[in-house]
Amino acid sequence: MGFWVPVYNKSQNPEPTAGLAHHAPMKGQPVTPTDGTAATLTPETQPKSPRKAALASWIGSALEYYDFAVYGTAAALVLNKIFFPEDSPAIGILKSMIVIGVAYIVRPFGAMIMGPLGDRYGRRFVLMLTLFLMGGATFAIGCLPTYSQVGLLAPILLVFCRMVQGLSAAGEQSSAISVSLEHAPENRRAFITSWTLQGTQFGSLIATAIYIPFTSMLSEEQLLSWGWRVPFWLSALVVVTAYIIRRRLAEPPAYLNQVRDGVPPLKRVFMHHKRAVVTVALCAMVNTVNMVFTTFALSYATKGHGLSQTQMLIVPVASNAVGLLMIPVAAVLADRFGRKPVFITGALTASLIMYPYLQAIAEHNWVGIFGFGMLMHGALYSLANGVWPVFYAEMFPTSVRVTGLALGTQIGFALSGGIAPWAATIYAGPALQDAVGPSIFVVAMCLLVVVAAWTAPEGRGKTLAELDESLAVAKG
């Protein structure tokens, strides 16, 4: 079996910007190495690097999703008082939750921008671009003036920063997952890609944990004046660290050696992979469990039932710690038994534990709060969370993987992340004390997820080349 060997010709393909990936190769098109030196790309000179890809995806996703998740914690604790001070507590919280939704609503538009860039110019190109966009927007939030200083301009600037974060997040996960999948050994694709989500989980853990010392050691006046800004400013460290790690990651051979026909990735997705996008979008609504647990439940507990902010912040920290252990376990199970059974089990069982968790909050039952929280979000939700990267990514061929994966996931995340926090807030009632309404909402959303996952194709047991071939045959 022969391999196409692209030859570098500097006169035909000028040196790209340092640190960024080159244009995706077409058959017979010369390829420029990122260091500007002459080279040829073959399976020997561009081998798979599963460990390096997993590490780069894990650390980059952890650091970048710290940036994205830190707003959710701040919104539940302080931002309603800083940016919406003239409202009642419930209305202020509702507005800050809606701002969370803004970042999710713009993510499908970000997917239509970042996805094609990842398929056309390289996975690493997008990983570097989203890193600077996310880090810059997060740092800017920490520098924003408050409502008392500039009035309505403050929440407007906040919404703009969240929109930039949403655009960035749209390309981050899909590119990291794609590069991990394409570097992975065929029989360990679920395990290697799961490290991207474990990184996301770790970032969410840090985003929540970092507020614990601030809420426990600072007075409310100090927290509202400057303390809330510090976690956002730490994004500067995020950018530097992730850049150092990601700049050395090579593009996977499957991406470099593919043959292109010149059809734009976004057009190809809409022409041939619409069903896969819809399936992924519906499955991605499992994020409802995560959004209600990490964002709404914090306000429900502290504002609706008067529980300690510091103690409630420990709950998602504990559940995320459990999730760090469960995500690779779920991935190993998916490599052994299939993606669908593990994903469906996690989505359904996690949703059923939402009511006992919220009821434990209403009863001030700390044993139940920690027990049900770690079971629901840490263990059961992680079954779905650890498997979805490989489950969704295998529904698209290499030529449009970033585009299709980004578009499908971001539509689902927009629906769940944009709707779930404020819908749960509304269903909890004006006093934020009803546990039944939000719980029914979560179960209903996850039943949709189960139906969609049940009808999806199973990628276990096929190589990436076989998946590409089958997807080329079964277009639509």
Image (cartoon, rainbow, N blue to C red):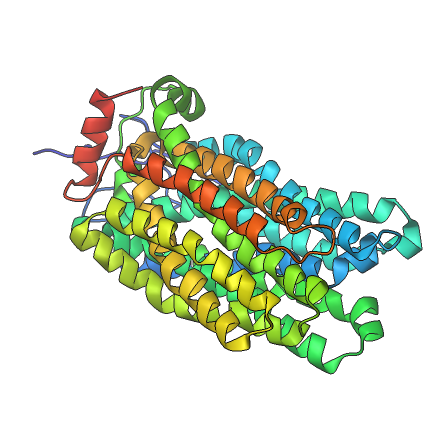
Picture residue at 50% right of the left edge, 77% below the top:
367
Picture residue at 30% right of the left edge, 34% below the top:
395
Q: Residue 248: tell me if it is visible.
A: no
Q: Position of residue 226 (x, y in %)?
A: 80, 69
Q: Residue furthest bottom?
A: 217
In the rendered image, the vertical position of residue 463 relative to residue 52, given as above or below: above
Q: Position of residue 1 (x, y in %)?
A: 7, 34
Is 387 displayed left or right of 315 in the figure? left
Q: Position of residue 425 (x, y in %)?
A: 66, 50
Picture residue at 55% right of the left edge, 74% below the top:
365
Is 37 displayed left or right of 80 in the figure? left
Q: Nearer the viewer, residue 101 or 56?
A: 101
In the rendered image, the vertical position of residue 423 relative to residue 265, given as above or below: below
Query: How many discs appear?
Result: 0
Q: Work out which quarter of the rendered image holds the C terminus and state it.
A: top left
Q: Residue furthest left?
A: 1
Q: Nearer the viewer, residue 298 or 231?
A: 298
Q: Position of residue 323 (x, y in %)?
A: 40, 65
Is 408 displayed left or right of 179 in the figure? right
Residue 230 image-quadrant placement: bottom right
Q: Residue 296: tell me if it is visible.
A: yes
Q: Nearer the viewer, residue 290 or 370?
A: 370
Is 353 displayed left or right of 145 in the figure? left
